[in-house]
Image (cartoon, grey):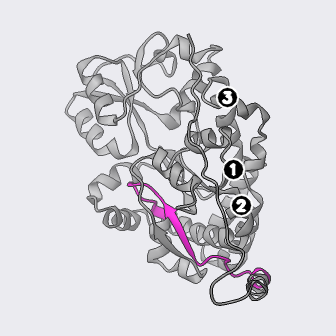
Amino acid sequence: MKKRFFAVLLAAAMTFSLAACGGSSEEKAEGESTKAEDGAPEQEVVKWNCGTSGNVLLTIAEDKGYLEDEGISIEYVEANANADAMTLLATGKVDVVSNAGTSNPLQQIASGVDLTIFGGHMVEGCMPVVAKAGAEWNGIESFIGKKVAVNPSYFAFTGAVMDLGYEDPLSVVDWEVYSDYNDALAAVVRGDVAYALMGTGQNLAVQEMAANGEIDIVSYQSEIMENYSCCRMEAQTDWVNENPNTVKAIIRALLRAQSYYENNKEEAVTLLAKDIEATEEYVAAYMLDDEHYFVSVDPLKNSVKRAWDILDKTGFLDEKAKDINIDDHINTELYEEALTEATEKYGDEDPEFYEEMKTFFEENDK
């Protein structure tokens, strides 16, 4: 019997003081008005959670001074898991989350947490699908009737099964949920499951095991569903609405970082490896895979809406989702404005990149 999963996180009530220390409310209002008029960030220090895997665009933006150029600095706030990051966001302990996937923020929105997606990090996260060496693979059709170590809230897979014509993907595949990718990998080796999805951070280990003939890499999540939307950038809706200049400053800095990343991936490997205290070999195993690792600041509205629809059809959204227009929780206007501004300010640095970003936006957000 198909189960409906409900998001259980409750958003904590937020209270804000109207008066600021060191000045009257009139002085504060005048200061905020001046910032809004000159385009300066309303908030100069942004509290950010980007997970243990880091965010290469943030790393570059800090290293190259792009954030500083925009009048922004980042205060990193750690979380142990995606759910913890969502809790930090809902309770106002962080301003922005960028590495908690797409399912997590969408499930929170469905449960009544007022979040807005305004940009992105990974479009495709270089997540391999593995099997025992010599296993047959005929695309997603090979999942049918099999036991697979894939969380069915990973909408790329359930969506692909539905695209085959199966109305209920939860009943035609035996989805096994493991809390750790290494446990899922061990299950493949033991033969407990036929296939398993691996995380971005497992690429080096998986590649070594495949080279030793222990397993096969049969596919990648991005081959199951192109531009599936791996990780989005989200914040509380009130924060986005109250800090439009801050949001645009962040986007402009990250666009410059993306431009730099596209042209200097080897250096990006070195920078991120140092930032997350990992070996360059570990980072290169996924970051230099141009076919399956794809980062972009773009909000990817169309892919997010597709994910929302799949999660709803497969029962992973709260019943409240029926009364929610997901368009109200995806802000593309600020991104479009920031892209135009970044093109005007920094377009000469890489004209082709900014033209490509404009085209990508037209294709994925309109």
Query: How far is disc 1 from disc 3 in space, using C-alphas?
Result: 18 Å
Q: Secondary structure at mark 2?
A: helix
Amino acid identity at mark 2: Asp
Residue 357 is left or right of residue 26, and the answer is left
Query: How far is disc 3 from disc 2 in space, using C-alphas?
Result: 25 Å
Amino acid identity at mark 3: Asp
Residue 245 is left or right of residue 279, and the answer is right
Residue located 31% across and 67% down the image:
274
Q: Quadrant of the N terminus?
A: top right
Q: Quadrant of residue 336?
A: bottom right
Please tell me which of labels 1 and 2 falls first in the chain: 1
Residue 349 spot, x, y in % from top left? 60, 77
List the single residue furthest toward the left: 212
Residue 39 spot, x, y in % from top left? 74, 80
Residue at image mark 3: 312
Residue 111 spot, x, y in % from top left? 65, 38
Numbered range of the magenta stretch:
35-57
Residue located 66% across and 72% down the image:
246
Please tell me which of labels 1 and 3 falls first in the chain: 1
- Asked whether residue 100 is drawn in magenta, I would say no
Residue 294 appears anywhere in the view = no
Query: How far is disc 1 from disc 2 in space, using C-alphas?
Result: 8 Å
Residue 215 is left or right of residue 110, and the answer is left
Residue at image mark 1: 114
> Is 4 located above or below residue 40 in the figure?
above
> Is 4 located above or below residue 199 in the figure?
above
Residue located 27% across and 17% down the image:
191
Q: What is the number of the mark on residue 238?
A: 2
Asked if disc 3 and disc 2 are in contact, CB closer than 8 Å, the reply is no
